[in-house]
Image: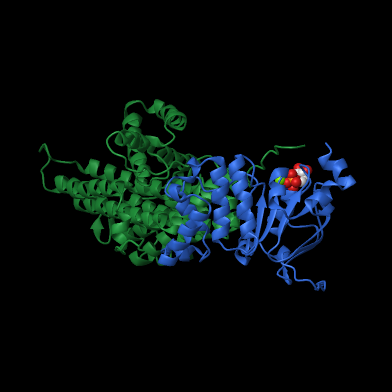
């Protein structure tokens, strides 16, 4: 038997993990440093705009990671993960709204502006507690987590799989979008939550706050990566791959497939919620548009482009595609959606293992590092009964 | 409970089991009785209900009527697939299904008896005796040299063997094996028959097969299914000389 290593070493024992975490560490240190230390105009200066933009990418990367955990490893194609991201974002947004206090346009000491505007007299019960940061952070985890747990419990127990599952996840996010659009839901309707002033007493606009938020996003991404890595490298991860490749085989081996799906789905939703919570103070707004079905589909494209079932591929995909989006929506806004669609088609047809699959192929020419196996076509009796061959 | 009183020891007992799909009776009052340690071959034309019978035993399909009793008093119709597997009934599918993107070793690791819970899996670490057991099974199914290759890259016959190994490592009391010889070379088929005969002492084996050479090599009691019920039962010679069997199956 190999001697027992501390868990953390096992998690980063592969080369891609080490490269990924090293690059992330360097970026985490350099970007805020160049922003805060070097003055504007210096060649080494990184603008606050860039810091915020990169911070946003990091949140997307964490979201992509969450989706890769369930899709890449367990075959659950969620087309509703944007909902968990948005819920985490709303929980953070509610905290930020309550920090505004009397500084709102109407100067009401407790009620956010939109409630005063709607002539509401008192704070709805579900806004209680959001003035406390720890409470709000708890909600960032609990709201997406509990929703995912309930949703998953119903869906997986009734063995909803494949495209049906994708459709109901899409319906979930769509239903939430419609609900959050309504003014009387009490989440700011159409306009959502915005005009944030400060977080934990620090101005959300300040360079230093931006830098800290950036660092927090990077740390969350690194921790999220380690959590996912701990899951996929354990026997639990191999059971997930079993569910992905041969669901009924795994079931007949005695595993309660629905429990496994429920576990990763919930973990994934919590990670998505945390990503949303970090995203909102950086972009300064959360509105029902975040629930829109297209957002959830975009996440799938990031993961597919990066390469699913590798974790770091999801991060690479999220950053690349969003960089492309930033560039193209600036330069050729009307082209972006076509490009995105085209990208998805090209990836599916020619790069089934995504961009990181290209790295791997190229790396194989220099050494023989074992890349992670691609998800094969599902070979599963529960999906298609085998056609009978033989004597008849 | 209407448990029948049975004098001979039975490990698995099906009584009057019927299953219909949209009015079509895939199993029609099927009864079957297996003794512990028995090796039993099931033959029958395509669509006879052989796979459906395994589906019923393993909890994939619920019978419309009839009893399925395991170990004298466990009513299997009340359990699901995972529970039945953990009770000690292993199953090999008609189409070999191994987990293609895990290695041969990892496939066996997953199959090995032990904690099946989510958190047990999260903290699971192989013990020395478990590794040893995997090594034994690898040896038994002749895959020692391929232990670290992905199961997806095995030949068809080797996948069949890996899947059999995955059953064995669970140490089930009953093994249900659906068409093991399909896609195997003659040598592999022969080796598989040998393996089953060896296993039969410790386990109860039910083998569904089309290949008559294979059935002959098993040299065991044969049950002929037809249209969802038992047509004949006995030694291979006996069933082969049964006129009804010749008419519906062998004669064609
Ligand atoms: N899930 C199902 N839905 C509808 N018909 C089925 C289903 N499973 C089996 N059948 C039918 O039941 C009959 C018995 O099938 P099966 O048990 O697979 O036969 P065998 O394994 O003996 O070839 C066949 O006619 C098959 O088409
Ligand atoms: Mg069959």
On the rendered structure, is B186 left or right of A276?
right
How is the model colour-coded?
A: by chain
Q: Where is residue B162 in the image (x, y as percent from the top left)?
A: 54, 50
Q: Where is residue A25 in the image (x, y as percent from the top left)?
A: 22, 50
Q: Where is residue A153 in the image (x, y as percent from the top left)?
A: 57, 59
The residue shown at (44%, 58%) is: A235
Q: Which quadrant is the C terminus of chain A positioned in?
A: top right
B191 to A306, vertically: above or below: below
Of the pair B45 and B184, the residue shown nearer to us: B184
> In which quadrant of the rendered view does residue B57 lie?
bottom right
The reply to whether residue A275 is visible in this rendering is yes
Of the pair B144 and A301, the residue shown nearer to us: B144
Quadrant assignment for ligand 2: top right
On the rendered structure, is B101 left or right of A218?
right
The chain assigned the colour green in the figure is A
Q: Which quadrant is the N terminus of chain A positioned in?
A: bottom left
Q: How many dots with numbers?
A: 0
> In which quadrant of the rendered view does residue B233 lie?
bottom right
Of the pair A14 and A121, the residue shown nearer to us: A14
The reply to whether residue A148 is visible in this rendering is no
Q: Where is residue A163 in the image (x, y as percent from the top left)?
A: 58, 42
The chain assigned the colour blue in the figure is B
A192 to B123, vertically: above or below: above
């Amino acid at each position: 038997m190999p001697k027992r290593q501390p868990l953390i070493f096992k998690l980063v024992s592969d080369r891609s993990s080490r490269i990924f975490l090293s690059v992330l560490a360097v970026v985490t240190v350099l970007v805020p440093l160049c922003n805060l230390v070097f003055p504007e105009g210096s060649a080494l200066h990184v603008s606050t705009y860039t810091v915020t933009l990169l911070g946003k990418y990091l949140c997307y990367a964490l979201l992509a990671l969450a989706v890769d955990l369930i899709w890449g490893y367990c075959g659950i194609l969620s087309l509703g993960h944007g909902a968990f991201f948005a819920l985490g974002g709303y929980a953070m947004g509610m905290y930020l709204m309550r920090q505004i206090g009397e500084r709102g346009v109407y100067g009401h000491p407790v009620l956010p502006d939109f409630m005063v505007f709607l002539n509401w007299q008192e704070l709805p019960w579900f806004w209680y507690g959001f003035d406390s940061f720890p409470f709000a952070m708890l909600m960032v985890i609990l709201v997406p987590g509990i929703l995912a747990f309930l949703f998953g419990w119903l869906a997986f127990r009734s063995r909803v799989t494949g495209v049906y599952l994708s459709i109901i996840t899409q319906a979930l996010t769509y239903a939430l979008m419609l609900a959050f659009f309504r003014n009387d839901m009490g989440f700011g309707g159409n306009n959502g939550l915005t005009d944030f002033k400060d977080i934990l007493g620090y101005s959300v606009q300040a360079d230093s706050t931006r830098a800290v938020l950036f660092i927090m996003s990077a740390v969350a991404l690194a921790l999220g990566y380690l959590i996912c890595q701990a899951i996929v490298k354990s026997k639990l991860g191999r059971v997930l791959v079993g569910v992905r490749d041969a669901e009924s085989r795994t079931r007949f081996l005695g595993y309660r497939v629905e429990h496994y799906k429920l576990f990763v789905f919930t973990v994934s939703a919590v990670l998505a919620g945390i990503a949303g919570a970090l995203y909102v103070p950086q972009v300064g707004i959360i509105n029902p548009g975040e629930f829109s079905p297209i957002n959830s589909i975009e996440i799938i494209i990031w993961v597919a482009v990066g390469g699913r079932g590798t974790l770091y591929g999801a991060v690479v995909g999220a950053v690349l595609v969003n960089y492309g989006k930033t560039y193209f929506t600036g330069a050729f806004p009307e082209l972006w959606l076509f490009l995105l669609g085209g990208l998805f088609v090209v990836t599916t047809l020619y790069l089934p293992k995504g961009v990181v699959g290209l790295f791997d192929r190229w790396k194989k020419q220099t050494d023989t590092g074992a890349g992670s196996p691609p998800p094969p076509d599902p070979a599963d009796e529960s999906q298609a009964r085998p056609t009978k061959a033989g004597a008849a | 409970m209407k448990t029948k009183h049975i004098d001979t020891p039975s490990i698995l007992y099906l009584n009057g089991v019927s299953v219909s799909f949209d009015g079509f009776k895939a199993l029609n009052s099927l009864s079957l009785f297996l003794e512990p340690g028995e090796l039993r071959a099931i033959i029958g034309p395509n669509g006879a209900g052989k796979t459906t019978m395994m589906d019923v035993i393993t909890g994939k399909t619920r019978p419309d009527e009839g009893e399925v009793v395991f170990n004298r008093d466990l009513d299997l119709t009340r359990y699901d697939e995972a529970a039945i597997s953990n009770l000690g009934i292993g199953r090999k599918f008609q189409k070999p299904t191994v987990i293609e993107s895990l290695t041969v070793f990892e496939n066996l690791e997953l199959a090995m008896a032990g904690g099946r819970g989510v958190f047990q899996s999260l903290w699971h670490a192989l013990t020395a005796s478990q590794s040893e057991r995997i090594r034994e099974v690898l040896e038994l199914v002749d895959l020692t040299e391929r232990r670290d290759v992905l199961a997806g890259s095995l030949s068809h016959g080797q996948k069949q063997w890996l899947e059999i190994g995955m059953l064995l490592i669970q140490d089930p009391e009953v093994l249900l094996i659906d068409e093991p010889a399909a896609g195997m070379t003659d040598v592999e088929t022969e080796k598989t028959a040998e393996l089953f005969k060896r296993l039969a002492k410790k386990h109860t084996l039910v083998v569904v097969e089309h290949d008559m050479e294979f059935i002959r090599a098993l040299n065991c009691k044969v049950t002929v299914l037809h249209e969802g019920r038992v047509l004949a039962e006995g030694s291979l010679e006996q069933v082969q000389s049964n006129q009804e069997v010749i008419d519906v199956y062998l004669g064609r």
